[in-house]
Amino acid sequence: MKTLRIFFICSIAMLLVSCTSVLPPLISWAHFSPPVAQSFKIDTNTAVVYGRFVTGPNFAFGNELALRLRNDNSKQEYLIQFKDKDSVYGISVEPGQYRVAGFVATFVDRRTVGRRTFLNTVPFEVRSNSATYFGDFIGYVKINGLNQEWSVTKVTNNFSGTTDEFRHKYPNLASTSVVSVFGQQSK
């Protein structure tokens, strides 16, 4: 009986070890695009997209949400992290045609847990040597017992207010041409 129990425990241990050696390639981790540094210099090969990416009041236990911004030409996706502090920021991208593709939900360790795709989003142009505002986004994560919800609840056009905050936060980009995907252009 004792030998059978030891054999059973060893078999389970070997099964777990063999499974965990196969699982890591099947699990994906989110790699959020870093905000541009305050010393960032824009040039003819780069552009900046910016907005407000804020979490709502129900954000839960360190789980995270990121907006998926896709370059239509290269199909490269940028993950823009929703934050509860310093939510106005920009990321460096290559110039081109972009669209908001959806969002990614992650656990606290950034393992991807969910992915939603937005259908029929309108593409917009990101030009070199400029900063493009593409909206203020509000998202949330809620935990109800064993269920978890991730979502983007609101997108607004607050071009003037967010641009003022962006220019204050990044004084090195204050003289950069700023364009809004909502059809407005700064002076």
Image (cartoon, rainbow, N blue to C red):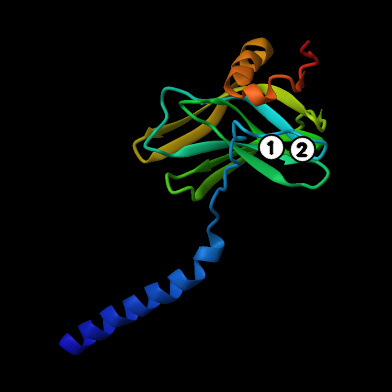
Say the numbered circle drawn on residue 46. 2
Q: Amino acid at mark 1?
A: Ser
Front one among 98 and 185: 185
Can residue 118 be seen at all in this image of the molecule?
A: no
Q: Amino acid at mark 2?
A: Thr
Residue found farthest to the left: 2
Residue 100, x across and y down, in percent = 70, 33
Circles 2 and 1 in contact, beta carbons < 8 Å: yes
Tag 1 secondary structure:
strand
Residue 159, x across and y down, in percent = 68, 14
Q: Is residue 59 left or right of residue 131?
A: left
Q: How many other residues sit within 10 Å of disc 2, few (<14), some (14-19) or many (≥20)? A: some
Front one among 181 and 56: 181
Q: Is residue 15 above or below residue 51?
A: below
Q: Is residue 73 left or right of residue 119?
A: right
Say the numbered circle drawn on residue 111. none
Q: Is residue 111 left or right of residue 96?
A: left
Say the numbered circle drawn on residue 92. 1
Instruction: Identify the mark nearer the N-term, 2 or 1.
Output: 2
- Say which quarter of the image contains residue 173: top right
Residue 45, x across and y down, in percent = 81, 40
**Which quadrant holds the C terminus?**
top right
Q: Is residue 132 above or below residue 34?
A: above
State the CA–CA distance, disc 2 to disc 1. 7 Å
Can residue 60 be seen at all in this image of the molecule?
A: yes
| Residue visible at 49% across and 50% down in the picture | 111
| Residue visible at 16% across and 86% down in the picture | 2
- Say which quarter of the image contains residue 117: top right
